[in-house]
Image (cartoon, helix red, strand yellow):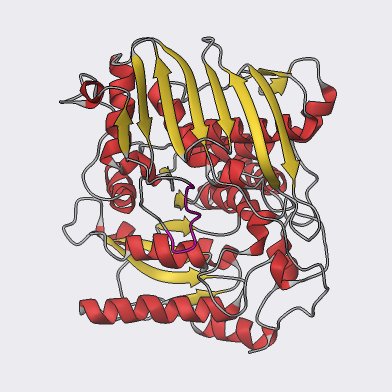
Amino acid sequence: MNRRNFIKSAIAASAFPTIIPARVLGENSPSHTIQLAQIGCGRIARDMDVSGFLKVKGARYVAACDLDSKRLQAMQKRIESAYEKQGTPGSIAGFRDFHEVLARSDVDAISISTPDHWHAQIAVEAAFAGKDVYMQKPTSLTIREGRIFSDALRENNRIFLLGSQQRSWDHFIKGCEFVREGRIGKVKHIEIGLPGDPPGGSTKEMPVPENLDYDFWLGSTPNVFYTEDRVHSQRDVGSRPGWLRCEQFGAGMITGWGSHHLDIAHWGMDWESIGPKYIEGKAKFLTGGLWDVHGEYDITMTYPDGVTMRIWDKFPNGIRFIGEKGWIFVSRGAAKMTASDPVAPGRPLKALDASDPKLIDGTPGVTLYRHPGSHHQHFIDCIKSRKASVVPPETAHRSCSACLLAWIGMKLGRKLEWDWKAERFVNDTEADAMLARPERAPYGAQRAYDRLKKEKKA
């Protein structure tokens, strides 16, 4: 299917589904159904988000959107087949341009599972369009983008949940509760282990597939030639895409997995609204191919209360809280979210472990945010109740910011001082210059935010 026919088919498919929009039924109607649109139809959408939302109560997909028509059509068929098996058949409208999705009155909320460099802009535009947002981590490509993202969701009173599903797993919750209770005494240090990325990626220029709108896919990032290893496989959806290993579109594992683990560290330490004070990092960045994110790395960050956090690729994949009375370690154990998730080296890890079993025995004396059901069900429940989720926008922004600060520390290789209130470095113009990136017109979160805020005031 060429691009012109693809657009025509998307328009033809945009006839409204037969389900009555949720807002027409009213919040208290027993038949109140939250109607979703899936934006991004790749590996994470297929294996995580669509699979998750198809299982929840009170929600139904009505649309899907992707810049690759092959992936879009496969997702439409996947969702329609699932509903057919559930005995509730219906068509799923397909779109290339997410703006068409946001313009639909029958869409209550969106699920964003795109590459990282598109997260913030789509979330910003969704907020101004009155849509609630579920979004995969990380929140943003830069710290400045993250601030724009958080402000847009807050200013428009939208429900938001980040795909930090570890906050919905009982052992992660318990681990943080035990730490906050003081089981290990005053916390002195935190160790975080994350996977790394391999070198590689073909630098050979290739023709753009007719099924892919490549210029749109690049978004606010620079216009560079197409090669499959820069985007995603045209043969299968399950493999890890090349964009994950290109700094043009993300920061590598420090945000890819770091957004999960630093979020848990922040939760356990009650650091959800702050950030580190000092950052020191070093890393080896990939060479010899297309991919250029960090490989080996070692970062130490000091928080305002004096607690240090070391993030090192040699640590076991997880979070270790170390206190005066021992340590508590939390990880995913042997669990994998997708088939292509990296496997932690060494012996199998326990999901919840401690220097003394008594430290994690019994019921915690502190209770953190708990909710019934899955992470995806939690989002739907929050939309209906209008209560903040377990990972609201500012919390998500702060955990992502810590990851990006670690990345800046890696790049500069010297000690940095961070003012978390002003979100600027202290007397360091070189580091401040890395808080944002130029946005290629007509794309970009900043450009979208400024335009939409002006239109809202008018």
**Camera-nearest residue between 92 and 140:** 140
Q: Decide if residue 212 is in sight here.
A: yes
Magenta span contains residue 339: yes
**43 horizontally vs 277: left or right:** left
Q: Nearer the viewer, residue 99 or 116?
A: 116
Could you tell me residue 188's position as x and y percent?
Answer: 46, 13
Reply above or below: 374 against 143.
Answer: below
Q: Is residue 245 above or below residue 258?
A: below
| Chain part drawn in magenta | 338-345
Q: Quadrant of the N terminus?
A: bottom right
Q: Is residue 105 left or right of residue 398?
A: left
Classify the position of the C terminus by image quarter: top right
Membership of 444 in magenta stretch: no
Task: State how many labels appear.
Answer: 0
Q: Which residue is at a point 51% across and 10% down the rendered structure image?
A: 305
* Residue at far front of view: 347
Task: Please tell me which residue is depicted at 28% across the width and 27% down the height of the picture.
Answer: 368
Residue drawn at 40 percent across, 60 percent down: 48
Relative depth, front residue between 452 and 291: 291
Relative to 124, does residue 213 appear above or below in the rendering? below
Residue 450 in which image quadrant: top right
Residue 107 visible here: no
Q: Position of residue 165 (x, y in %)?
A: 38, 46
Q: In this view of the protein, which residue sits in the foreground, 180 or 135?
A: 180
The relative height of residue 250 versus residue 410 in the rendered view (above or below) is below
Q: Position of residue 208 (x, y in %)?
A: 75, 78
Main SS, magenta region, reads: loop
**Residue 433 placement (x, y as % from top left):** 81, 32
Residue visible at 44% across and 71% down? 63
